Image (cartoon, rainbow, N blue to C red):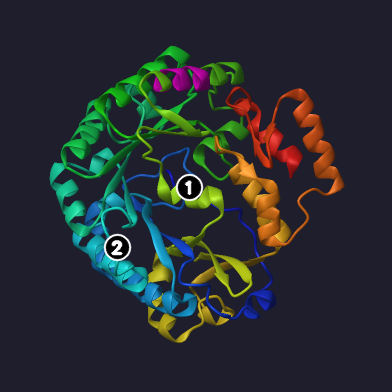
Amino acid sequence: MTAAKPPQARLPSAAAAGLKAATPAPETAELGVYVHFPWCLKKCPYCDFLSVASPAADLRHERYADAVLTELERRARELGPRRLKSVFFGGGTPSLWDPEQVRRVLAGILGAFGNPETNAETRPEVTLECNPTSFNGARAQGFIAAGVNRFSIGVQGLEAGRLQFLGRLHDPESALCSVREALASGVERVSADLIFGVAGQAPEVAAAEAATLAELGPTHLSAYALTIEPGTQFGALAKKGKLPLLDEGRVAESFVAVEETLAAQGFEHYEISNYARGGAYAVHNLGYWRGTEYLGLGCGAWGTVDFGAERVRYRNTPSPERYLESAKDWPHAALLDAGAGELISVVEPLDRETLLRERLLLGLRLAQGIDIDEQAAELGVEAWPADRKRAAQRLLERGRIVRHGSRWIIPKDQWLFADGTISDLL
């Protein structure tokens, strides 16, 4: 999956009930929209995103689109004017959704936030996540007709046994075929996801798989080391000591091998797990990393939006049934209020210190780093409390971070230690 997941937090219901929409942000404020499609054919054992296994015949395509559009209408009314930068259909498996329903939802989003002066250079990036089991040339054409201009293909691996271990339903050839058909479809941009660092995988194998994908011609690749998350099947197995894991040193070697291979193929390593050719960055994810507002729509979706001087994070109910059943009440509810009833599961107002910490957390993942002083000034908080200043000095002396003016950057040869570096600065 390529969509960022924000930190989870809960507020007492009294705090949530006190949130009211204030003056909307200026119309020039950029906005990303994330639409979550919660269903998959099968739940992958490593995945901690909301997904519900369902046979394709049981999916409620039109009803779910109706509910998303109902939510959109109410949220757009509360949020006010924004300049739409990107739309991301994530999941789950959005490529299972009927293209006509994707078209309806996207038309609604563009109608709510579209810029009438949009042209080929300024129109929003519209990404759809796709699995090889529900994507082919015909479906690609349907999604392109719906307005999608970027496909993100969940390849994850190119060896049959490893794909089976990861719980994937496709084989290596169908994964490669999906990427080829996406590229042949005429869509503007194609990205592919790859997981490395799986038990038994040598670094040279990880590099070879990255090279195979790169040679097909996508403009973007995401390469993630396998992470074991609590609440997943892999998490439960690891807790019992029953999950085979690759040695951390070999994972690090794989990270370096993948980077060197993709650099030779002309890819820029612009974020710890992401590579682009020709400046084809993931616009929607850049919004997450840079702290841009994003509106979350759909079952289980997270959103982070501004209301006047306050930024608020929320999450919709993770229950598809509850999401669908409660839609009839949304037109009359303030959707960031406890009065929204069954829709809201989390509401969290974000203070400015928290916002700065999150911008550090995400911005330092980028090759260009982050201007800490500028971000702090924008938020009106202290950039360098004494403990952060001391930590930064230690990191500078160890070469774990460098400073170019007021911009702080983790050198690429130190990205393997990025989590610790960022933790120290927080």
Look at the picture and state if 173 lies above or below 253: below
User: Residue pushed farthest front?
Assistant: 405
- Of 210 and 66, which appears nearest the observer? 210
Quarter in which the C terminus is drawn? top right
Seen in the image, is 272 located left or right of residue 195?
right
Q: Is 239 covered by the magenta stretch? A: no
Look at the picture and state if 354 lies above or below 115: above
Q: Quadrant of residue 70?
A: bottom left
Where is residue 378? Give x, y as percent. Answer: 66, 59
As shown in the figure, which amino acid type bears the numbered disc 2? Thr
Which of pointers 2 and 1 lies earlier in the amino acid sequence?
2
Q: Which residues are magenta?
A: 254-262
Return the mark for residue 118.
Answer: 2
Where is residue 220? Give x, y as percent. Answer: 36, 35
Return the mark for residue 391.
Answer: none
Residue where numbered disc 1 is placed: 286
- Of 140 and 289, which appears nearest the observer? 289
Exactly how many numbered labels are in the figure? 2
Q: Residue at x 28, y 42 (%)?
A: 189
Seen in the image, is 189 located left or right of residue 346?
left
Seen in the image, is 426 located left or right of residue 134?
right
- Of 121 and 135, which appears nearest the observer? 121
Look at the picture and state if 219 lies above or below 324: above
Look at the picture and state if 151 lies above or below 409: below
- Observer-side mark, 2 or 1, equals 2
- Of 389 and 237, which appears nearest the observer? 389
Q: Quick check: marks 2 and 1 in contact, CB under 8 Å?
A: no
Quarter in which the N terminus is drawn? top left
Where is residue 325? Give x, y as percent. Answer: 39, 75
Measured Cα–Cα span from mark 2 to mark 1: 20 Å
**Callout 2 secondary element:** loop
Q: Residue at x 75, y 59 (%)?
A: 381
